[in-house]
Image (tube, rainbow, N blue to C red):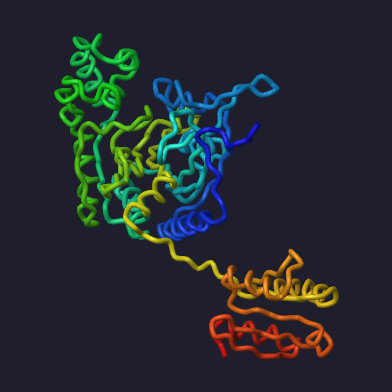
Amino acid sequence: MAMNAPRGTVDILPKDVKAWQYVEDQIKEICNRYHYSEIRTPVFEHTEVYQRGVGDTTDIVQKEMYTFEDRGGRSLTLRPEGTAGVARAYVQNKLYGEASQPVKLYYFAEMFRYERPQKGRMRQLNQFGVEVLGSADPAVDAEVIDLAMTVYRSLGLTSLKLIINSLGDKESRADHRQALIDHFTPHKEELCADCQVRLEQNPLRVLDCKKDREHPAMSSSPSILDYLNDESKIYFEDVKAYLDSMGIEYVVDPTLVRGLDYYNHTAFEIMSDAEGFGAITTLAGGGRYNGMVEEFGGPSTPAIGFGMGLERLLMALDAEGIEIPDDDELDCYVVAVGKEPEQAAVRLVHELRTNGIQVDKDYQQRKMKAQLKAADRYRAKYVLILGEDELSQGTVTVKEMATGEQKVLPKEELLETLHGKLTGGK
């Protein structure tokens, strides 16, 4: 029986990992520039963290979580999203008591969701996320959106579309909720089974349904923007003004609700307009979630964040024909033939690595010609040849692969010479 990776998972092979590392390094540099700190939370949490944080009425909690019971009878769930775990960590570790506020965090994390695998949407996915906890300033909303857009633009993406909306405060949402119930109730039996339940539990989620999106009642549904109270309207206008001041273009879409229960006020998505990107165009999404920290026993804490799928980011780069810089070169490759030269090569490789030189050697006991071919495949800048003659004379033959030029150096001069060549010296 062939053993394959589980459905909805993939192996990220060494030839592809370089692209992942490049993207992650670029993102980390941007987060540092924006003064965000990295946080790492457990890959599984008590199931209640997601039930309370994400919301019982969401598809994630109802259908997509990988939940299991451990040997102590505790219900645990593999991380399906990042925000709830960060909020739990914020409360448990009393980060709300830190002198510097707000707390600005980012993370790279694997997520697990049981859903139908398709291009760019896996059951094990990788996500970059940002969370800012402890500020109700609409300027923070704009900063978080700016950070997400900066990530995409710094990597070269241009076919981007930013969608924003306001979900209002608790009072505004309550009024809109009742309006949605009144609007959809006459059509209840025409909606899918999920939406019939959502209409009772969380009618805002009806607007996010993929099955009923073409139903006539959707296009005529009450807009949240018509139910915003004065405070919510002012907040949304401030967010838009800050985006305008930074020159960030956006489109207001009253139907944008996001798929999680915890959002209020600002909600946003960033989409790819690139030709051939696929039917699912969303690259990142997030919004404000004032109230979640209290769910975990913490003080009243306003917060905002987003999640960005790294698989979808790499897909977008490919769709726009953006190539990841290829700097996969090897500094040095040691070639040796014979038992004594082989032993000397092992010592030499160790010494060079200890002194900061990137180096590799043959481990297949191949002949010199085959070893030189291997050095070429590895794109080695220099080949260091150790034979019987070099060994007896205490020298090393250094071949520069770009020019074919060879020099015989005393072994004691090798390290200084390589450092000079590899750092641009002569």
Note whether residue 132 is visible: no
User: Where in the figure is residue 8, as x and y percent of width and height?
Assistant: 50, 35
Horizontally, residue 15 falls left or right of residue 321, namely right
Where's the C terminus, which quadrant?
bottom right
Above or below, 398 relative to 163: below
Q: Tell me residue 290's x, y (percent).
A: 37, 34
Given residues 51 and 289, the one toward you in this image is 51
Residue 170, by quadrant, is top left
Q: Is residue 226 above or below residue 377?
A: above
* Label tally: 0
Can the viewer see residue 367? yes
Name which residue lies at 22% across and 57% down.
247
Q: Residue at x 26, y 21 (%)?
A: 212
Q: Nearer the viewer, residue 91 or 286?
A: 286
Q: Position of residue 252 (x, y in %)?
A: 19, 40
Residue nearer the viewer, 205 or 288? 205
Residue at the image point whose x is 76% and y is 88% from the top: 395
- Specify the quadrant that holds the N terminus: top right
Tell me where residue 191 appears, x and y as whole percent: 26, 15
